[in-house]
Amino acid sequence: MNQDHLATTACSSGVASAPTMPLEATKQLLAPPASQTESAVGSAVGSVVSSTVATANLASPASAVASVASPASASVPVSEANPSAAVNVAQSTPSTAKPNILDESVVGTEEDNGRPSRDTTNSMVQLVIISGRSGSGKTVALRALEDLGYYCIDNLPVNFLLDLTTMAMTRYPKLAVSIDIRNIPDDESYLASLITDIKHNPQIHSTIIFCDADDQVLIKRYSETRRLHPLSKKHLSLSEAIVLERTKLSNLAGFADLRIDTSDLSVHDLANEVVTAILGSPEKHLVMVFESFGFKNGIAKDADFVFDARFLPNPFWEKELRRYTGLDQPVIDFFKRYASVGTYIKQIDDLLHYWLREIESSNRSYLTVSIGCTGGCHRSVYIAQSLANLYKERGFNVQVRHRSLEDKGHNLP
């Protein structure tokens, strides 16, 4: 840059009275002595910017900064004079840049974008990985986890596991996946690195269960089901495929938190083993369903217990109560006058309570108790609702259905 160009630049900036000087002299003028502090430098640069704005009568502060900082319009870049001075100039200029959404100092609200903001900092994923040799019972184990409320995926490609766990932090807090010989990567180091990352992630509580059985047991199971082993497609015999599968899954088996030998286990025993590993006890949270029905409409076909209430006093024969149901207070007060109704409810409760632990340990998910009367509107409804309320108070997971009332279109609570 020559002296004539510097003079032209100064005039175009509105500083017509400023004397023309060489470039090196201009740098020395702008550069502060070494003894000055960074704050003094910032003030000096700010003064130059303010003076330029006042003299040139510019509309935008950014234009003034550009006239000083740009090498094309000023004698020297600010960044060459002092890096900290450039920071001070930038801070004096209003910023129009959008905040970085990944910046922890930026806090978003629901009104910012019309969508609820999701805070995943405290999200915890319960991840269960089921693996093992083909025919060892992985499907049974996965179904047991599904009954416990897990979102289950069978035969998940390992490459998708990391993305799935990230998504699960907001959508699937209880996640179970099955990984076997069909979907493990050829690179064993990738699988080892992936599982190590998952186990060390503080937001993921992981459990790896590996199912296996004796070779002869697996051969027998394949013979009974007549299914093709996944590795048999490589022109291997069944016994050769089973042995090769053990070798290929050996590294994954080494990461297992629990290994289950299913050689001598029934499907119910295996399910109990899995439930015990997850909950600490073999009993699942049994759902108790209490339903009422009318015998004139047919007996309940999905019931585990059926109790007949047609011998009890019937409010139907009292005209003022006929239009009510067993959920209405006038009918409730009617039944409370008869000790036989309370005795019958207590005897049903005693029977259920006595056998409930055995029922829970049998790996059942539901227990349906049906109470029937003639029309399914009074006696059966009152008894079924009374039992449901009783077991709700005890902390059981309870569902109630009144079939006849539903068929008649009654508004149920």
Image: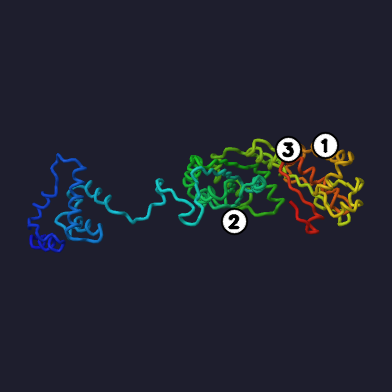
Which image quarter: residue 390?
A: top right
Q: Return the residue nearer the eye: 271 or 56.
A: 56
Specify few, some or many for label 1: CA neighbours under 10 Å numbering under 14, 14-19, or 20 or more.
few
Q: Locate the N terminus and report the quarter of the image it occupies.
A: bottom left
What label sits on residue 350 in the rendered view?
Answer: 1
Task: Check disc 3 and report the residue beneath it.
Answer: 394
Q: CA distance from mark 1 to mark 2?
A: 57 Å
Residue 54 found in image quarter = bottom left
Query: Which-is-in-front pick, marks 1 and 2?
Result: 1
Local secondary structure at mark 3: loop
Say whether disc 1 or disc 2 marks the residue closer to the N-terminus.
2
- Report the Cα–Cα distance between label 2 and label 3: 55 Å
Q: Which residue is mark 2?
A: 233
The residue lying toward the viewer, choosing from 324 and 95, is 324
- Whichever of labels 1 and 3 marks the residue nearer the N terminus, that label is 1
Marks 1 and 2 in Cβ contact (< 8 Å): no
Residue 34 percent across, percent down from the top left: 14, 41
Query: In this rendering, is residue 156 above or below 274?
Result: below
Residue type, label 1:
Asp
- Left or right of 193 in this view: 68: left
Q: Which amino acid type corresponds to the residue marked 2 in the rendered image?
A: Lys
> Residue 100, position in %: x, y?
39, 52
Left or right of 270? Residue 105 is left
What percent of the width, then of the height, locates residue 166? 50, 49
Amino acid beneath label 3: Arg
Mark positioned earlier in the residue sequence (2 or 3) = 2
Q: How is the image coloured?
A: rainbow
Which numbered disc, 1 or 3, marks the residue closer to the eye?
3
Residue located 52% across and 44% down the image: 123
| Disc 1 from disc 3: Cα separation | 14 Å
